[in-house]
Amino acid sequence: MRSWWRVLGVVAVVGALSLGAWAEKLVVIGPWSGDEAKPFEAVLQAFTEKTGIEIEYRVMRSEDLGKVLPAQFAAGIAPGDVLLTAWGWWVKKFADHMVDLSAEVADVPFGFLTPIVVEGRTVGIPYAVWVKPGFWYRKSLFEAHGLKSPTSWAEFYGLLERLEAIEGIEDAAASGDEVGWPLSDTVEHFILAVGGKDLFLDLTAGKVEWQSPEVRAIFENFIIPYLEHASEPIEWTSAKDLWWEGKYGIYFMGNWLTGMVDDPSDLGVFALPGAKAVTGGTDYIFVPKYSERIDDAKKLVAFLMSKEGQEIRAAGGGKLAIRTDVSPDAYPPAEKALIQALQGFKIVPDMDDTIGGEWQAAFWDQLKLLWVKPEALDDVLRVLDEKFPKG
Amino acid sequence: MRNSPRAEAKRAEEGRPRWGLPLLFFRARKGEGLAALGFLFLGLLLIALFVIYPSIRTLWLSLFNEDGFAGLSNFAELFSDREIVDFSRFLRREPPWGALLHNLVWIAIHLPFTVGLGLVLAVVFSKVKSWWVGIARGAIYLGIVTPLVVGGVIIRYLFEKHAGLVPQVLGALGAGVPWSAGWTAYPETALLALIIGSIWLWTGFSMVLHSAGLSTIDRELYEAAQIDGASEWAQFRHITLPLLRPVTLVVAAMTFLWELKIFDIVYVATMGGPGGASNVLALEMYFSAFRELNPYRASAIATLITLFSLPVGYWFAKKRLGR
């Protein structure tokens, strides 16, 4: 009997200690895991060293947060103190449940992405930037077959044909799939290249319909001819592997690709002819007002957005700093080259991430259909108009 | 419990349930009823909190929209929504035919296959005495212990163009696109791929229940039939099938309910695509709730799924509470 009391005592002490240790940690929830999370974890580590505030980092994708948070907010609780999501539209919808972070970013020089402000309160702060600069290729492949980045549409479609003529290449372009975002990225790039930035922004704002003649023409005259040379949608990391192995010639992807290949120095990238802008996006930081450590959470946000915090993140690669005062020297070589390549391009917010909601899911899904059934174009454009958020 | 022989005989004759819940409270002696209530209290409380209240709340929400009380208009909109029912394309063109029709197609193919296959496999495995029977039975049962999310990933890769066994084999046999391509990428094959995958995932359930049912059949019946010269087929038709009927009905009911609320494997393998070609009611409910942020439409779909499940659920509960 005595020994039982001892066991119970030990369990109680250990439990209390671990509960205390857990309670002291600031909980940060972000979408990155594995290697992709390491640069962010380095920033968190630097914050802990500076302030002594311990942090527990947990991984949850935007999709998962979107399922969990509405119920938790309704109950007046939150799973973490500082959260990150790519869904800016979602942050706007739930702004009432978030802390005002205006003071933490008052001095931050933002670039093309700015904080989400609802009724005068800054509720979402853009963190690190990714861009979708265009089609990636292996320099070694292009050099071996005397291929060049295209500068006109004729050259672009000629390149696709020449790539397909190479032995071992199944399709000229690989098409990534997950829930569909790699396809929407590709389409957005075509719209920017052919229709220009203004048409792109008008489409994002709902001022132009998808069934309008100018948008339809982009699909009919540029995207559908491209699809003749593109693979069917394949899970995007598998598609990356197959492209890298030489089954496909080019691959449209964001700049995080530089951290996913064995030899980033073999990577080349080109934007479509005529493109003067490329899309970019971010993950938004927010602090739920149900956090029990709002002051510490604000301190972390301020550090993440400080020049020091942004430079540590930039040094990790894969993303660009949101602050415009971070020097190109802060980046590893691949990102430095990318910044060079982006000179002269405007960066506009990714369309589907900006609109979000049901439309985003429909956009991804309809493009998956278009990729294998180009003849379904009428249905695809009709659905995109029908699903567009009203008001 | 007072059970006069006459009342018991009458009840047995009528085939009515002997231990229905109302009977427990209204016909039992006072002390017994209270004791039963004491034992059931915690369970009933949990059911009330986590099943009954949410169900009533969902039903209530389905009668509203953003402007207030909407009556049955959410349901009327559902039935005029192409994403739920699209008869103009049904069986004339490739999917999408609407989430509800996809569920019904799922039931029409999956239900007879899993129930029939489970029955046949159970009978075959009970007849064959060999070393491989245990391995085969285990392999088939694996489907039912595999988490559906993992099942969805397996289905996705099973039908993937490069990694998938099915398109590779069909391609080698000379089949064209989409049969030799990624099934989940094409509207003609996406729903079919999910249904075929789900047959593998669920057949183990049917097989195990039928195997358990087979073990309860008296062997003497087969011996007597053999003495009378009955063939294997005749034994199956006149002994096995009728005596397994209660098990088969339970399997069919459970399978039907599973098919109506199918979500996980669709979410993981196709997300309802391409172009909604493999969308189902539960996924449409998810999109309404968490993407559209429209709890009213989501509740209406949830209520619809419940309404479709109710007759089968009621029948099943009646059977379970019966003899």
Image (tube, helix red, strand yellow):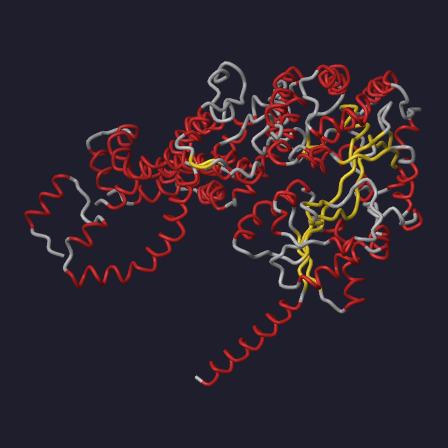
Query: Is B170 or A209 nearer to us in this picture?
Result: A209
Q: Is residue A208 left or right of residue B308?
A: right
- Residue B285 point in image, percent of width and height: 50, 36
Q: In the rendered image, which quarter is residue B116 located in?
A: top left
**Quadrant, the N terminus of chain A:** bottom left
State the residue at coordinates (77%, 20%). Answer: A226
State the residue at coordinates (54%, 35%). Answer: B266
Q: In the rendered image, which quarter is residue A163 located in?
A: top right
- Relative to B5, say whether B235 is above or below: above
Looking at this rendering, what residue extends furthest in the bottom direction?
Answer: A2
- Residue B131 point in image, percent of width and height: 46, 44
Q: Is residue A130 left or right of residue A391?
A: right
- Residue A31 point in image, percent of width and height: 69, 48
State the residue at coordinates (7%, 50%). Answer: B5
Query: How many labels were placed on the picture?
Result: 0
- Residue A174 point in image, percent of width and height: 75, 28
- Relative to B105, say whether B17 is above or below: below
State the residue at coordinates (14%, 53%). Answer: B27
**Quadrant, the C terminus of chain A:** top right
- Relative to B302, say whether A69 is above or below: below
Q: In the rendered image, which quarter is residue A361 located in?
A: top right
- Relative to B285, say whether B9 is above or below: below
Looking at this rendering, what residue extends furthest in the left direction?
Answer: B6
